[in-house]
Image (cartoon, rainbow, N blue to C red):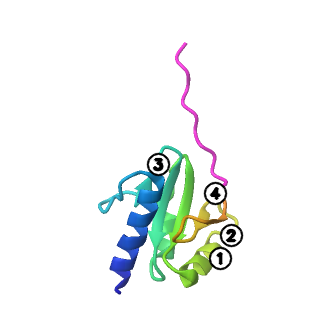
Amino acid sequence: MGSSTTHDNVAKRIAKKFGVEYNKGKGPDVSTENEVIEVETADTVKDGLRQLRGFQKEVYIAGANKEVVEAALEATKDTTIGVMDKNCKILKPSTRKTRRKKRKR
């Protein structure tokens, strides 16, 4: 199975678990009201860090396999980016704060 196929399968699984659609185009792979998730393979962990910049909700790298999860855990040390495995098990929580919308007065 090629890494692109692995990436797509994991992204679809995670999107389904969160009840949203997998975004195959530009932008984050999976986006919910509270989280943004980038699915990464061994060659793309550093890309995931870059792609998650600027989001003001919890952000996660989801590793496609154990090797990727370990690389993501190492790469996200001292960052607000969390790490989850391909089954959505959070191994490092995101500490990025969600920006609250201002109330109308």
User: Which residues, given as a range, are shown in magenta?
Assistant: 95-105
Identify the image quadrant of the N terminus. Answer: bottom left
Dot 2, how many residues are within 10 Å of its Cα: few (below 14), some (14-19), or many (20+)?
Answer: few
Spot occupied by residue 94 in the image (x, y as percentages of width and height) = 64, 57
What's the CA distance linking mark 1 and mark 4? 14 Å
Q: Quadrant of residue 82?
A: bottom right
**Residue in front for this viewpoint, 18 or 97:** 18
Please give the name of the residue rendered at 57% of the width and 82% of the height, measured from the top-left corner.
Answer: 66
Q: Earlier in the sequence, mark 1 or mark 4?
A: 1
Front label number (2 vs 3): 3
Q: Amino acid at mark 1?
A: Glu
Say if mark 2 contacts mark 1, CB within 8 Å: yes
Q: Amino acid at mark 4?
A: Ser
Q: What residue would you read off at disc 3?
A: 32
Q: Secondary structure at mark 2?
A: loop
Say if mark 1 contacts mark 3, CB within 8 Å: no
Q: Amino acid at mark 2?
A: Lys
Indicate which disc residue 24 carries: none
Say if mark 2 contacts mark 4, CB within 8 Å: no
Spot occupied by residue 74 in the image (x, y as percentages of width and height) = 65, 76
Q: Secondary structure at mark 3?
A: loop
**Main secondary structure along the magenta-highlighted residues:** loop
Is 93 situated left or right of 47 in this image? right
Q: What residue would you read off at disc 4?
A: 94
What's the CA distance linking mark 3 and mark 4? 14 Å
Q: What residue would you read off at disc 2?
A: 77
Is 96 situated left or right of 39 in this image? right
Q: What residue would you read off at disc 1?
A: 74
Q: Amino acid at mark 3?
A: Thr
Front label number (1 vs 3): 3
